[in-house]
Amino acid sequence: MQTAGAIGVFDSGVGGLSVLRHIRELLPGERLIYVADSGHVPYGDKSPDYIEQRALALSRFLIEQGAEAIVVACNTATAAAAATLRSRFAVPIVAMEPAVKPAVAATQSGVVGVLATIGTLESARFAALLERHAGAVEIVTQGCPGLVEQVEQGELDSARTRELLERYISPLLDRGADTLILGCTHYPFLAPLIRDVAGQHIVLVDTGAAVARQLQRRLQAELPGRPQTASSSAQFFTSGDAQQTSRIISALWGQQVTVQYLPEKFSRGEIA
Ligand code: DGL
């Protein structure tokens, strides 16, 4: 029997698992390969060029491993590198951006808050997104330094994480936001704590499910008739500490996994 090619997914760390879980749900029977670029996390404070080099290296690795499509499960990497990846690789590249359109449709108060990395908020791509979809709705943005690191440590409910969330969310609530965009794939893992801090009435919007649907559409349109297996499988790689990453991924993924080291030539900072 012919074996299906894989779906390659990457993020700066474990945040992309918030997208991968939607892919697993929508597309059972796919072989999934996930790379957590934990040796280079966070992307949010790196230059667009640096992130682009990382995205190129990780995509090359995934394609070498048999990926027939790549999901950039990271808003920051999408802003810095999606266009370059599409120009360099022939496989479908599914990327993501903060969910401005659904949030604008959801708000009752006319004010939407965006929690994202500085890299995403400062990108031309984000400015264009607001231009297209904000309309008459007021969009208030908030960069969140330190939050990604909390998720990487598995601190989904610690006092320090709560303190950061209070600091970042209060100004948005003061401005009248009733809807918050989780514009970084790490943040859905903080949703219970965000609700606790912002109040249970707050509407939280993220893009994980929409990205999985977009992947499904692209596979059907561009790679029809791909063979499926009876159940999905997932392999995990990291450019950081494999033991630490195994511990966090197992907790977030809901089953014990062993994370492998990304080969040296793909895990270095500088790329040929
Ligand atoms: N998870 C990422 C995002 O969606 C990147 C976070 C980071 O490394 O700063 O933006």
Image: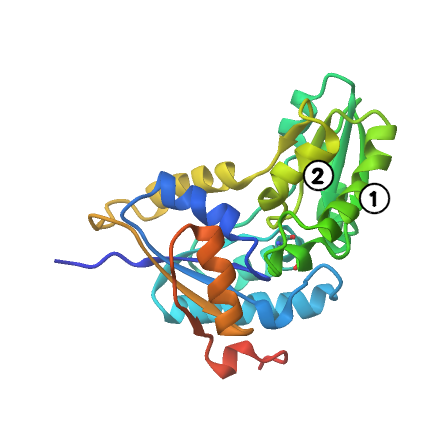
Q: Is residue 261 above or below residue 11?
A: below
Secondary element at tag 2:
helix
Q: Is residue 16 above or below residue 139?
A: below
Secondary element at tag 1:
helix
Q: Quadrant of the N terminus?
A: bottom left
Evaluate whether residue 30 shows in this view: yes
> Which scheme is used to colour this image of the protein?
rainbow
Instruction: Identify residue for label 2.
Output: 129
Query: In this view of the protein, which residue sits in the foreground, 96 or 237?
Result: 237
Instruction: Identify residue for label 1.
Output: 167
Callout 2 amino acid = Leu
Query: In this view of the protein, which residue sits in the foreground, 15 or 209?
Result: 15
Provide residue 3's location: percent of width, then percent of height. 21, 59
Residue, far left? 1
In the image, is the residue at mark 2 within 8 Å of ligand 1 by its beta carbon?
no
Query: In this view of the protein, which residue sits in the foreground, 216 or 221?
Result: 216
Query: What distance separates the C-alpha of mark 2 from that of mark 1?
Result: 26 Å
Dividing the image into four quarters, tell me where ligand 1 lies: bottom right
Examine the image and state in which quarter residue 37 appears.
bottom right
In the image, what residue occupies the spot 28% across and 45% down? 224
Q: Is residue 70 above or below residue 183?
A: below
Provide residue 60's location: percent of width, then percent of height. 47, 70
- Left or right? Give the position of 180 relative to 36: right
- Left or right? Give the position of 25 relative to 55: left
